[in-house]
Image (cartoon, rainbow, N blue to C red):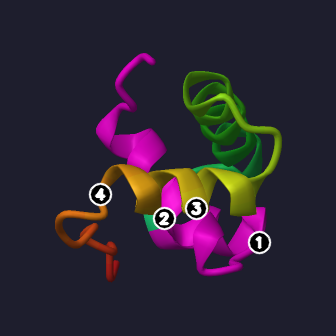
Amino acid sequence: MSRLTQRELEVVQLAGLRLGDKEIAQRLDLSPRTVQNHLHRAYEKLGVSDRLQAARRLSDLYSGGSIPIPDT
């Protein structure tokens, strides 16, 4: 499995909090299309097909420690 970039990680974490693409884009100062691109690449790297599966996969990968949630 390829490693997620820092931005992909941030986007997946926020998506796991059930934020929409527009909300994520506002928090991270990105366009909603860029958020979709980050999510798509993260799905491929994590071997999943949606944002909740991606968040669960991250949770499984980081079960030994906490995943930092961006508060921007």
Whichever of callouts 4 and 1 sits on the residue coming sooner in the sequence is 1
In the drawing, does residue 23 fall left or right of residue 12? right
Foreground disc of the pair 3, 2? 3
- At 22% from the left and 72% from the top, the residue drawn is 66
* Residue type, numbered disc 4: Tyr
Whichever of callouts 3 and 2 sits on the residue coming sooner in the sequence is 2
The reply to whether the C-beta atoms of the residues labelled 4 and 1 are less than 8 Å apart is no
Measure how far apart labels 3 and 2 are at the Cα level: 10 Å
Q: Tell me if I can see residue 29 in this picture.
A: no
**Pointer 4 residue:** 62
Q: Position of residue 71 (x, y in %)?
A: 32, 82
* Residue type, numbered disc 1: Gly
- The segment highlighted magenta reads 1-27
Whichever of callouts 2 and 1 sits on the residue coming sooner in the sequence is 2
**Pointer 3 residue:** 56
Above or below for 61 versus 15: above
